Image (cartoon, helix red, strand yellow):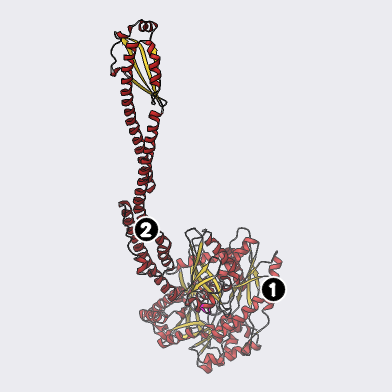
């Protein structure tokens, strides 16, 4: 602005000088013109007089005299025409018109002033007199005037510049002061405020109120000063508010960071630890100071270093906004710590990574629990072998990669071990069996436990049927050696079902085939193996169909009872009837109990079947008691499964049925297998049944391993000797001795002994000789329907008498 003022002063000075010089020159020119006109008028009057008096001859002298005048340079008479000059020469000068001053003409060119005066006769111009005055006449005054003008202009210019300087200085003083304060604010005040904001330090009052900027001077400068003061105050106030918020935020962050129960760390982009909290130090068993001087890779588990480096790379390049993953660290003692880690990155204004923020929660226990659950999910808790889920996975994998074979192993009569020694000892024996089988299978495949006493071996390294059969033979041979348990030896045999994969078969297909094969192996006599073929599939399909039909038959008249008489060994009189289930299938005809009872046991339908048998038998007994009161002394014997004895509601249902049919509980005998008597839970229910008045019979006695001492403590009223023992007793020897000991045992225990399966008189004689009290078998009657019992059996007093005659020697 000062420059503009100075320029304006210079221009005004030049204009003033130009106007001054111009005005002085004009004034000088007017003065010169006046002087010239006055001098010229006098000269021309004299010239006219001279010319009139003396004629033209006197003009030369006049010219010389005029030219001698100091200011006159020359005088020149210019004739305007030849005729006019002749006229003057002939004395016509007295005829000249009077000279008029208004006819004078003054011309200045190149500093020389020329005065021209025309002479006329009768108004006709004849001569022009021109007087030239010297150049100095006007040049010198003009030069002086210019010099004076320049001097005056310079003086004015200097005065203007001085005034401008004072004005500019007055104006720029405020600007300089404002500039100084702005620079101070930019270089000192605002950086201090921003530094405090960045560092999270509180902004001091002095920083927030640096003082008012007050500049006096030009109004614009004063307005600018006021505006800047307002601006700086607004910036300071904003910075103060921002600083306060950042301080509060930083305080909250510090409190949350330092006091968080989760481990936290700030990591530089170079992987160097910048800051950690106490929770992380505790988690890793290290000091905070040690951690803050460490590098993150030094704290990681070696197997997770590369993975963490990849996470850092993706975070710092912006490829990943955040990451949550399981990362392992090492404690100071070298122990592994599993963490669930969250990672995020903070960038600066230029997009460069500044800090990676890590949050870590200790999930070591959770991880171990997950591993335990995974172990439980895929492994058997008792033996540690893969379970059914793992088996199906392995089998599916084997099917996708080749043609595996399957060997299903079912331990023979292992339930007897559990029942006789208890489940704890049975579990220990099962663990030993599993370990031996696993050692045998491991070289060629994988062994899994299906449950109970069933195992499955997936055999991958087999190419032909002979390989599968050889593997089964080796498994059976490996099980021949006894197992040692608490100083006792146990021999455990197994039955094996083999199945080889066929195209398009699934894992379930192969398992189903192996199950059918092991079922067949057991039917053939246990302790062997059977390879699946289509006939076994047909049998399996048959069993499946039987199961379906049996479910439909329960509760209908398809299920009924046939009764076989049990007679007194001495008199042949009817003592009891055993109710045997029969199934009158609408399309198959009568289905053998040997076909549908195993199906019922396998599928769990045996409980419903047993309840149906109880209901039918007691209903028939009630009818016979009403129609044949004379035979009211015989009792009804019905079979009871071990599964039924695990039903807590069994005793109540039996009591309800007895009351409903008004049957004396003493007339009901419930037969259980010898192995059932080794089941403590079953025995408890048998005791409750005996308390009702129901009698208990041990069926197939002699086929199991019941100890004599145990039998004395069992709730047994009748011993039914297994038919195999009766048949073998005919030959004498050990079988006869055993049968005799059973008879003596019955007498000693005060229980009745029944000989089962008596079909010949020789067997009858052996049973009687052994002391058996009752006889049951085809010799004295086959199982017959209830109406046949009513019509034929009950009216007969001596069933022995109508039996086939004893052959004579």
State the residue in front, 159 or 356: 159
State the residue in front, 759 or 298: 298
Q: Residues within 10 Å of mark 2 (few under 14, many from 20)?
A: some
Q: Residues within 10 Å of mark 1 (few under 14, many from 20)?
A: some
Query: Given contact means CB atoms under 8 Å apart, are the residues at marks 2 and 1 in contact?
Result: no
Q: Quadrant of the C terminus?
A: bottom right
Is 286 within the magenta?
yes
Q: Is residue 20 above or below residue 611?
A: above
State the residue in front, 289 or 320: 289
Using the rendered view, name the quadrant where residue 459 is placed.
Answer: bottom right
Q: Which numbered disc flags the more N-terminal residue, 2 or 1?
A: 2
Q: Which label was assigned to residue 473? A: 1
- Where in the figure is residue 353, as x and y percent of width and height? 51, 62
Could you say whether the residue bearing mark 2 is in a helix, strand or loop?
Answer: helix
Could you say whether the residue bearing mark 1 is in a helix, strand or loop?
Answer: helix
Q: Which label was assigned to residue 189? A: none
Residue 1, visible in the rendered structure: no
Q: Which label was assigned to residue 177? A: 2
Span of residues in magenta:
282-288
């Amino acid at each position: 602005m000062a420059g503009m003022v100075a320029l304006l002063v210079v221009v005004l000075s030049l204009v003033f000088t130009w106007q001054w010089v111009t005005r002085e020159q004009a004034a000088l020119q007017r003065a010169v013109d006046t002087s010239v006109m006055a001098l010229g008028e006098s000269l021309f009057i004299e010239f006219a007089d001279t010319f009139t008096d003396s004629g033209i001859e006197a003009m030369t002298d006049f010219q010389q005299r005029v030219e001698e005048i100091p200011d006159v340079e020359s005088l020149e008479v210019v004739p305007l025409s030849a005729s006019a000059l002749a006229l003057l020469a002939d004395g016509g000068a007295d005829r000249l018109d009077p000279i008029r001053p208004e006819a004078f003409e003054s011309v200045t060119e190149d500093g020389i002033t020329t005065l021209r005066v025309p002479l006329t006769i009768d108004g006709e111009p004849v001569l022009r007199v021109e007087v030239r005055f010297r150049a100095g006449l006007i040049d010198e005054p003009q030069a002086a005037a210019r010099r004076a003008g320049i001097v005056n202009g310079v003086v004015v210019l200097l005065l203007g510049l001085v005034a401008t300087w004072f004005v500019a200085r007055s104006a720029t003083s405020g600007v300089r002061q404002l500039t100084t304060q702005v620079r101070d604010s930019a270089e000192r005040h605002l950086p201090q405020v921003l530094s405090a904001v960045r560092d999270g330090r509180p902004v001091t009052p002095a920083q927030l109120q640096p003082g008012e900027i007050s500049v006096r001077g030009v109004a614009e400068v004063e307005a600018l000063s006021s505006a800047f003061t307002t601006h700086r105050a607004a910036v300071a106030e904003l910075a103060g508010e921002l600083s306060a918020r950042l301080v509060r935020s930083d305080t909250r962050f510090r409190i949350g960071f330092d006091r968080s129960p989760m481990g936290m760390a700030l990591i530089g982009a170079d992987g160097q630890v910048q800051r950690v909290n106490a929770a992380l130090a505790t988690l890793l068993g290290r000091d905070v100071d040690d951690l803050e001087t460490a590098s993150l890779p030094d704290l990681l588990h070696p197997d997770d270093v590369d993975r963490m480096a990849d996470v850092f790379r993706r975070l710092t390049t912006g490829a990943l906004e955040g990451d949550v993953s399981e990362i392992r660290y090492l404690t100071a003692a070298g122990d592994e710590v599993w963490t669930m880690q969250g990672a995020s990155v903070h960038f600066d204004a230029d997009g460069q990574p500044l800090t990676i923020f890590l949050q870590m929660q200790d999930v070591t226990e959770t991880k171990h629990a997950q591993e335990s659950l995974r172990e439980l999910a895929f492994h058997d808790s008792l033996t540690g072998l893969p379970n059914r889920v793992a088996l199906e996975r392995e089998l599916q994998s084997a099917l996708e990669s080749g043609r595996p074979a399957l060997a299903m192993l079912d331990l023979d009569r292992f339930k007897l071990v559990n029942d006789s020694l208890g489940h704890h000892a049975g579990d220990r024996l099962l663990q030993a069996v599993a370990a031996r089988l696993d050692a045998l299978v491991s070289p060629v495949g994988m062994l899994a436990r299906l449950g109970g006493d069933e195992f499955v071996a997936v055999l991958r390294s087999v190419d032909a049927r002979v390989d599968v059969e050889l593997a089964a033979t080796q498994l059976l041979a490996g099980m021949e050696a006894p197992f040692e348990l608490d100083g006792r030896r146990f021999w455990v045999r197994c039955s094996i079902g083999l199945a080889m994969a066929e195209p398009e078969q699934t894992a379930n297909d192969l398992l189903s085939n192996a199950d059918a094969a092991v079922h067949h192996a057991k039917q053939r006599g246990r302790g062997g193996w059977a390879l699946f073929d289509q006939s076994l599939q047909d049998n399996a399909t048959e069993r499946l169909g039987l199961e379906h039909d049996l479910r439909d038959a329960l509760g209908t008249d398809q299920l009924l009872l046939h009764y076989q008489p049990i007679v007194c060994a001495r008199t042949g009189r009817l003592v009891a009837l055993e109710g045997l289930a029969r199934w009158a299938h609408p399309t198959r005809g009568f289905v053998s109990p040997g076909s549908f009872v195993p199906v019922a046991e396998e599928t769990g339908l045996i409980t419903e079947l047993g309840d149906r048998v109880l209901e039918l038998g007691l209903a028939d007994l009630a009818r016979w008691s009403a129609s044949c009161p004379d035979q009211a002394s015989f009792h009804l014997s019905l079979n009871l499964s071990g599964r039924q004895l695990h039903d807590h509601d069994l005793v109540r249902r039996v009591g309800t049925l007895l009351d409903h049919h008004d049957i004396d509980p003493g007339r009901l005998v419930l037969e259980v297998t010898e192995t059932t008597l080794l089941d403590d839970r079953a025995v408890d229910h048998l005791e409750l049944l005996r308390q009702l008045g129901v009698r208990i019979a041990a069926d197939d006695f002699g086929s199991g391993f019941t100890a004599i001492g145990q039998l004395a403590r069992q709730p047994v009223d009748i011993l039914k000797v297994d038919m195999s023992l009766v048949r073998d007793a005919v030959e004498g020897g050990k079988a006869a001795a055993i049968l005799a000991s059973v008879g003596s045992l019955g007498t000693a225990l005060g229980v009745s002994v029944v000989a089962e399966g008596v079909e010949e008189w020789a067997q009858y004689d052996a049973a009687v000789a052994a002391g058996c009290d009752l006889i049951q078998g085809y010799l004295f009657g086959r199982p017959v329907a209830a109406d046949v019992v009513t019509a034929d059996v009950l009216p007969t007093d001596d069933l022995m008498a109508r039996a086939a005659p004893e052959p004579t020697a």
